[in-house]
Every structure is written in C-alpha cells, then in structure tokens.
Amino acid sequence: MTTKIHIGADHAGFELKEKLARFLEKLNYEVTDYGAYEYDEDDDYPDFIFPVAKAVLLDPESKGIVIGGSGQGEAIAANRIAGIRAVVFNGQYEPKDGREVPDEIVLSREHNDANVLSLGARFLSTEEAQEAVESWLNTEFSGDERHVRRIAKIDQLGL
C-alpha cells in the first residue's frame, strides 16, 4: 500500500513544496498538493494548511507536510485541528558543549506519533528537507504504552 502524503505551503514555502512533492513522487508516495499553486507573496498559510490537516484527519494512514518561512505558524494552524499532531523541524540541534542529543525528527514519530511535519523553508536546504522528510516517513510510532497514554490524554483534552 502506498502512503498518501498531503502537502501544502504558503508563498514562503512554495518553492520547497514543489521540490518535495516531486521528490516524494519519485519515492512512490501518492502526493496530494493543496497549494499554493503559484507564488503570491500576499497569500495566507491557513488557506493551505487547514486542508492538509483535515485530509490527514480523514485518512489516519496518511501523513501531512506543511511548509512556510519558519514552519511555526503552519504547525500552530495544523494543531488547531483536533487529532493532528504537527511538529516543527528546522534542522537537527547540535549543541556546542559536546552533549549528545537525540534525533528530533525520529523522536517526533517514535514518541509523539506526529502525523504532520512542518518545515521552515528559510532554515532548511532542499537536501536537508528531503533527508528530514524521508527519515520522518520511514520512522514508525513505537506504540509504547507510555506514549499511547500521553497521546490519548492530548486527544481527550483537545476536544
């Protein structure tokens, strides 16, 4: 079964969205594009993000990818839809003091069962975004009881 990917972006994420959609199609994902369909610096990200989030909610086996300048507003908008767990990724944090930190993109799936990935086009190169998306899509939710319990609490409070 081919995983369905719902994708949307505003003007700031338009170029990266176009590249990621083609990248995902080459990886044999079924991609549905919710716009923007052309660059318009006056467009508003909720117009593209809400349809992505709603599509993911209606098809729990699918995933969503939303893209903006920082990805922050896009994640906030997506998370307004009960049942959506959108996370922002703008690059793996690398501390300067030698500490090791876990792979954030992997944890978002393993621990949080994130179903929407929000990317900041102003922070990521195309290659970094592709690597993040591929890693995110290839990581399964762990299903550990503690994570299931926590997600259930979020879902109950989000109604």
Image (cartoon, rainbow, N blue to C red):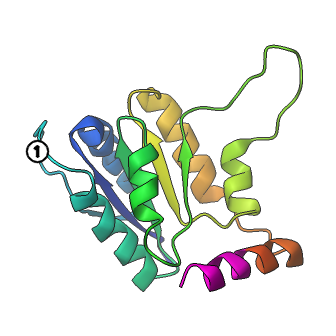
- Say few, some or many: other residues with alpha carbon within 10 Å of mark 1 (under 14 / 14 to 19 / 20 or more): few
Seen in the picture, residue 98 relative to 91 is either above or below; the reply is above
* Residue occupying image coordinates x 14% and y 46%: 43
In which quarter of the view is residue 35 placed? bottom left
Give the image quarter of residue 49.
Answer: bottom left
- Check disc 1 and report the residue beneath it: 38
Residue in the foreground of this view, choosing between 95 and 59? 95
Q: Horizontal placement of 119 versus 147: left or right?
A: left
Please give the name of the residue rendered at 11% of the width and 40% of the height, measured from the top-left corner: 42
Whether 121 is drawn above or below 137: the answer is above
* Residue 55 pos. (x, y %): 36, 76
**Taking 151 as reference, is 57 left or right?**
left
Instruction: Look at the picture and state if 22 lies above or below 99.
Output: below
- At a point 68% along the width and 60% down the height, the residue shown is 109
Q: Is residue 153 magenta?
A: yes
User: Which secondary structure class fits the magenta region best?
Assistant: helix
Task: Check disc 1 and give the amino acid type.
Answer: Glu
Q: Give whichever of 144, 26 is nearer the camera.
A: 144
Percent position (x, y) of residue 132? 57, 42
Locate residue 16: give its quadrant: top left
Q: SS class of the residue under badge 1?
A: loop
Horizontally, is 55 left or right of 85 in the view?
left
Q: Residue at x 33, y 50 (%)?
A: 21
Pinpoint residue 6: horizontal percent, then vertical percent: 36, 65
Where residue 94 appears, as percent x and y from the top left, is: 74, 23
Q: Residue furthest top?
A: 96
Residue range of the region highlighted in magenta in the rendering:
151-159
Whether 152 is among the magenta residues is yes
Evaluate whether residue 29 shows in this view.
no
